[in-house]
Image (spheres, coloured by chain):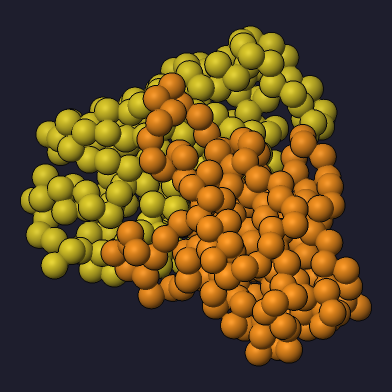
Amino acid sequence: MVKNINDLNSIHIDVLKEIGNIGAGNAATALAKLLNRKVDMDVPRVKIMGFREVSETLGNPELPVVGIMLKVTGDLTGNILFVLKQQAAVLLVNMLMGKPTDEEGDDEGHVFDELEISALKEIGNILAGSYLSSLSALTNLNIAPSVPGLAIDMAGAILSVPAIEFGKVGDSVLYIETEFTEGDKRVVGDFFLIPDVDTYSVLMKALGVSF
Amino acid sequence: MVKVIKVGMADLQSSVHPCIITTLGLGSCVGVALYDPVKKVAGLAHIMLPSSQQARNNSNIAKFADTAIVKLVQDMVALGAEKSRLVAKLAGGAQMFSFADGTSEMLRIGARNVAAAKEVLDSLRIPVISEDTGGNYGRTIEIHSDDGRLKIKTIGHGTKEI
């Protein structure tokens, strides 16, 4: 029988949370090194949602955000999505490039130039790479990220992209979400690992958990 | 006060006049808006996938172009609409992300959703009178029951009515 999201029990959920913990911990360290600042993360959440809730994962579905997406390939397949509020993306790029940020300024309408966009993609690369390499070390699975794609658009439209694959197998999605914060608890962004349903069993087996 | 009805992802809603039916942040999914201009019955479906035939689980018929549009027409007829008078407007079906290997099935899903919706509408003899599909950006859409106009809002690509 083909396994589904509904077949996950509390032990499986804990395993997924722990994966988020280890992966995001490693990614937060990488981001901290990159920015030369302290980067914190919250406790990862395993979000199982109906499709109607997906676009509201980060609140208002029309909120303009920057989304960096990478496909995960290898023994484990799925997607990685890093979502930043527009303002946080500006801050991150400025930090990386050593440019001052107008702290009171309204960056809502900021138009990213080509250099800034490639900097954001590179941040996505580094975060995804460090997240997956710790996951790979933990599981002994062969896992690799694709090159990143970037979209600056409505949160709902961006968050729905990885959800579509779930539509073929069920009526809910599973996102492992970790929030990154910097400095005085300013939210940097939300990092999502979204493994394909078909690879839950691979993941569980690699960690010695029956599924 | 006009009643505003929200349609989620993989969802469909219809209503008699007066109403506004809206769906927020449409990406690769396609929004199919149907309207009977005489009875002023409006309907909107937020479709995720082209076909229920290729899916392992097809219990939610609002998810697929082939099943959602048929259901939406049924619902609207039950509200007094005449099938032969229905007209369709399409929006969405974008490709939000592009990758170097832009050939993967998941990334072309937007275009496939639009094509599937058109095929189903054609088989039901419902004309598509206007569309705003494709591109690489998200859309919020709302159909107004007074005249069937479909208002489209975007970030950075303006607002329009079709």
Name the residue located 67 percent from the left edge and 52 percent from the top edge: B91
- Is A68 situated left or right of B162 in this image? left
Which of the 4 image quarters holds residue B5?
Answer: bottom right
- Is B144 situated left or right of A70 in this image? right
Residue A6 visible at all:
yes
Q: How many marks?
A: 0
The correct choice, above or below, for A137 with respect to B85 in the image is above
For chain A, the rendered hue is: yellow
The correct choice, above or below, for B115 with respect to B101 in the image is below
Query: As rendered, which of B146 and B5 lies closer to the eye?
Result: B146
- Is A10 situated left or right of B135 in this image? left
- Is B24 situated left or right of A188 in this image? right
Q: Which percent across, then down, holds residue A28?
A: 42, 30
Q: Which percent across, then down, holds residue B71?
A: 55, 78
In which quadrant is the N terminus of chain B drawn? bottom right
Which of the 4 image quarters holds residue A71?
Answer: top left
Which of the 4 image quarters holds residue B141?
Answer: bottom right
Residue A184 visible at all:
no
The correct choice, above or below, for A25 with respect to B109 in the image is above
Name the residue located 71 percent from the left edge and 50 percent from the top edge: B131
For chain B, the rendered hue is: orange
Q: Which percent across, then down, holds residue A85?
A: 64, 38
Q: Which percent across, then down, holds residue B45?
A: 61, 67
Query: As rendered, which of B141 and B71 lies closer to the eye?
Result: B71
Name the residue located 80 percent from the left edge and 70 percent from the top edge: B20
Name the residue located 13 percent from the left edge and 67 percent from the top edge: A1
